[in-house]
Image (spheres, helix red, strand yellow):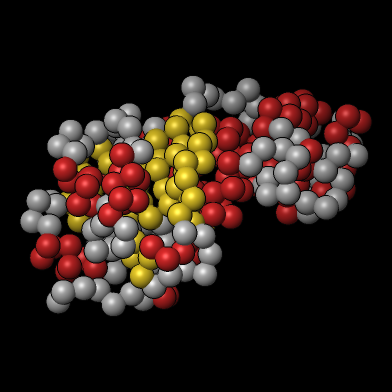
């Protein structure tokens, strides 16, 4: 088999531009020697990752044809997990930290980031290519239309950089949308001053009704919201506002 026929159901858009592939791999620092590549496909990023001898590379790929291709073409690639990233207990397989890199399957990129959040204390860095719109959302600050759940939750624990935009025509087949590469680096915050469970709940619940004022959307969590927040909408709150709000709700509910 000389190539893998792209499968739409698996979000397969193979990058065909070597310079961009190299640039993505060069964007990954050495915060951790263990690196997990999600969805290597035919290995366009993998080939450059393997050149970085300081890294201990593992790849996880759901598609059997791609796995066979990788086995045949990359004899140096020792660790191939032929599995679904969303279904494997990744964190217990690594002894300590691991970084993540990948041209992510766009249909599951948000889910990938929610998994990252669960494992955040083990993941110092992520370099990922996603839909441009998702990259903008993740990097967005309060006051912007694209600011949402993933922006707040990820920014609470990661410093986020929008690195560069990638056009449609460097993929086979070309996706319908532009792509972008982002880098997330774990910030120094290992414990929020409030309940983290409640923080996630407050953020998710307020953005689920993003047009509503917080006193309405958060009614089920807090019967009488502090005056200062009651009339605001979620996109007006910065990450630290959400942390303060959660702390106040926690105290009121005591
Ligand atoms: N990195 C390659 C392929 C990107 S396309 C390139 O840049 O060319 C996305 C890849 O993710 C595909 O190979 C697809 O099979 C794989 N994939 C899709 N869903 C997956 C999942 N749940 N777990 C692991 N890999 C997955």
Relative image position of residue 78 (x, y in whole percent): 12, 51
In this view, the residue in front, 40 or 175, is 175
Q: Is residue 209 above or below residue 98?
A: below
Relative image position of residue 124 (x, y in whole percent): 39, 32
Relative image position of residue 250 (x, y in whole percent): 74, 30
Task: State the image quarter where residue 224 is shown.
Answer: top right
Task: State the image quarter where residue 254 is shown.
Answer: top right
From the viewer's perspective, tell me whether residue 235 is left or right of residue 79: right
Residue drawn 32% across the image and 58% down it: 17
Residue drawn 10% across the image and 65% down it: 72
Q: In this view, does 243 lie above or below 232?
A: above
Residue drawn 41% across the image and 56% down it: 104
In this view, the residue in front, 54 or 61, is 54
In this view, the residue in front, 164 or 204, is 164
Q: In which quadrant of the rendered image does the N terminus lie?
A: bottom left
From the viewer's perspective, tell me whether residue 230 is left or right of residue 97: right
From the viewer's perspective, tell me whether residue 249 is left or right of residue 171: right
Residue 244 visible (yes or no): yes
Q: Is residue 90 above or below residue 53?
A: below
In this view, the residue in front, 94 or 56, is 56
Residue 12 visible (yes or no): no
- Tally the numbered discs: 0
Relative image position of residue 227 (x, y in whole percent): 91, 31
Residue drawn 47% across the image and 41% down it: 163
């Amino acid at each position: 088999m000389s190539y893998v026929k792209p499968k739409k159901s698996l979000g397969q858009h193979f990058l065909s531009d070597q310079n961009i592939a190299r640039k993505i791999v060069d964007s990954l620092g050495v915060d951790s020697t263990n690196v997990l590549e999600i969805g290597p496909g035919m290995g366009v990023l993998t080939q450059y990752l393997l050149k970085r001898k300081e890294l201990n590379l593992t790849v996880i790929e759901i598609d059997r044809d791609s796995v066979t291709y990788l086995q045949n073409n990359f004899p140096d690639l020792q660790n191939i997990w032929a599995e679904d990233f969303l279904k494997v207990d990744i964190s217990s397989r690594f002894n300590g930290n691991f970084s993540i890199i990948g041209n992510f399957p766009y249909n599951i990129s948000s889910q990938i980031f929610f998994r990252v959040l669960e494992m955040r204390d083990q993941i110092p860095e992520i370099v990922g290519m996603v839909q441009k719109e998702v990259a903008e959302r993740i990097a967005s600050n309060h006051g912007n239309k694209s600011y949402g759940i993933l922006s707040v939750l990820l920014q609470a624990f990661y410093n986020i950089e929008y690195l560069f935009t990638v056009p449609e025509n460097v993929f086979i087949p070309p996706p319908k949308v532009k792509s972008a590469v982002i880098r997330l680096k774990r910030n120094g915050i290992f414990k929020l001053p409030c309940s983290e469970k409640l923080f996630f709940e407050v953020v998710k619940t307020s953005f689920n009704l993003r047009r509503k004022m917080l006193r309405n959307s958060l009614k089920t969590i807090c019967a009488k919201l502090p005056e200062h927040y009651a009339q605001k909408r979620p996109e007006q709150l910065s990450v630290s506002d959400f942390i303060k709000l959660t702390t106040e709700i926690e105290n009121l509910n005591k």
